[in-house]
Image: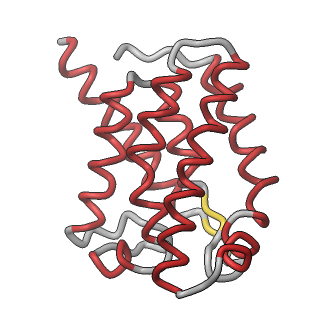
Amino acid sequence: MNNKVKKMCVLSMLLCILIILAQIKIDIGYVPITLQTFGVYIIALLLQPKYSFFITFLYIFMGAIGLPVFSGMTGGLGALLSYNGGYIFSFPIMAYAISLLGYEKSVVQKMLSCITGTIICYTIGTAWFMYVMKMDLMSSLMMCVIPFLLIDTIKMIISVLLTQKIKLPV
């Protein structure tokens, strides 16, 4: 099989995985627990920075034009401009940072890159949440960060261990 075709197939598969993982959702308040960030971790740890940025950007573009790819089978600009939109907008930056720091690195470096990417996601997403909801920092952190620390740590650990075993032809 042609190398370009292999690359397109792998990138498409990872995009599909992100879309599927986005649909796994538990509502716990304003910001639900989803597996979107788990998908971003996997993509970023398996791909070079430019590809991980591209896939997550394409995910946002697909949702922006109305395809139901975001959590809860939503899409459109309304979903992106809602109080949760900042987290989605952070995905390309998050993926690029994780990939830049963790692609083809040791387990410890991969974990540290995921932590860095999560901080980027929390920062952009929570800032957007504060802006849209007109809330103060402490209230926003209590709603958007604190409840997710444990589950995101578990997602990071699983994604690092999983990607240690996967080698893609990209």
* Residue at x-position 22% and y-position 12%: 3
Foreground pick, 42 / 136: 136
Q: Quadrant of residue 163?
A: top right
Q: Is residue 126 above or below residue 114?
A: below
Number of marks in the rendered image = 0
Residue 17 to residue 62: above or below: above
User: Which image quarter holds the C terminus?
Assistant: top left
- In the rendered view of the protein, which quadrant contains the N terminus? top left
Left or right of residue 74: residue 31: right
Which residue extends farthest right? 150
Residue under the point 37% across and 44% down: 15
Location of residue 6 by image quarter:
top left
**Between residues 48 and 121, which one lies in front from this camera angle?**
121
- From the top left corner, tell me how far across and down residue 126 is, in percent: 57, 67
Residue that appears at 78% across and 66% down:
147
Q: Position of residue 24 (x, y in %)?
A: 59, 62
Q: Is residue 8 above or below residue 58?
A: above
Scheme by which the image is coloured: secondary structure
Between 97 and 163, the residue placed more toward the observer is: 97
Residue 97 is left or right of residue 64, and the answer is right
Name the spot of residue 10 as percent of width and height, x first: 34, 28
Q: Residue 39 appears at what percent x and percent y? A: 53, 45
